[in-house]
Image (cartoon, rainbow, N blue to C red):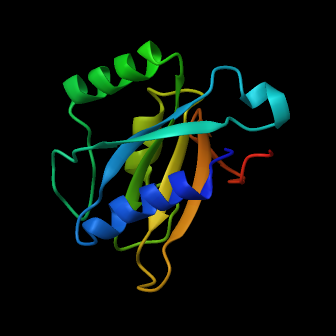
Amino acid sequence: MNISTELLDEVIAHALGDPRNEVCGVIAVEPDSSQDDGGARAVRVYRATNVHASPLKFEIDPQELLELWNVIELEGNELGAIYHSHVRSEPYPSQTDINFAANWPGVEWLIIGLASGEQPLVRSYLIEGGEVQEVAIAEPAM
């Protein structure tokens, strides 16, 4: 994913705003931008509410997710990534994440790891058919 420092900082700030619980949200990308230079170009971050308010799992209320998806499409963009934080582990998809991703083919999973207690670690993955593949996070080319 190509994401600006400002948008990535927004995602990290969301995670640091509640370091005891997993936070979540979605990232909009420009349509067809993944074909331009090998990675989708992020254009906006949308915070969501973790209905569980839990350090162990996240879930976006289906109605809120549908509303966010509709806003993204109305703005002429696409849902490019779902993000969430891991407060007690490294930023690698859990089995719960892998199972949930089965419903979202082609969507990246951006995970912010807070376990180190220092600088948050951010990684992104494509999860297809239960297989996890890390994808690069880069600053968009100007």
Q: Position of residue 77 (x, y in %)?
A: 54, 21
Q: Is residue 18 left or right of residue 101?
A: left
Can residue 86 be seen in the rendering of this structure?
A: no
Residue at coordinates 59% horizontally, 59% vertically from top-left?
123
Could you tell me which quadrant the C terminus lies in? Answer: top right
Residue 68 sits in quarter: top left
Could you tell me which quadrant the N terminus lies in? Answer: top right
Above or below, comparing residue 39 to residue 36 in the picture: below
The answer to which of 71 and 35 lies nearer the viewer is: 71
* Residue, far front: 142
Residue 26 sits in quarter: top left
Residue at coordinates 64% horizontally, 20% vertically from top-left?
31
The answer to which of 13 and 66 lies nearer the viewer is: 13
Q: Position of residue 40 (x, y in %)?
A: 68, 35
* Residue, far left: 52
Above or below, comparing residue 97 to residue 90 in the picture: above
Above or below, comparing residue 103 to residue 39 in the picture: above
Q: Is residue 90 left or right of residue 106?
A: left
Q: Position of residue 66 (x, y in %)?
A: 30, 21
Q: Is residue 117 left or right of residue 79?
A: left
Can residue 89 be seen in the rendering of this structure?
A: yes
The answer to which of 109 and 43 lies nearer the viewer is: 43
Residue 47 sits in quarter: top left
Q: Position of residue 97 (x, y in %)?
A: 42, 47
Residue at coordinates 33% horizontally, 49% vertically from top-left?
24
Above or below, comparing residue 123 to residue 135 in the picture: below
Total labels: the figure holds 0
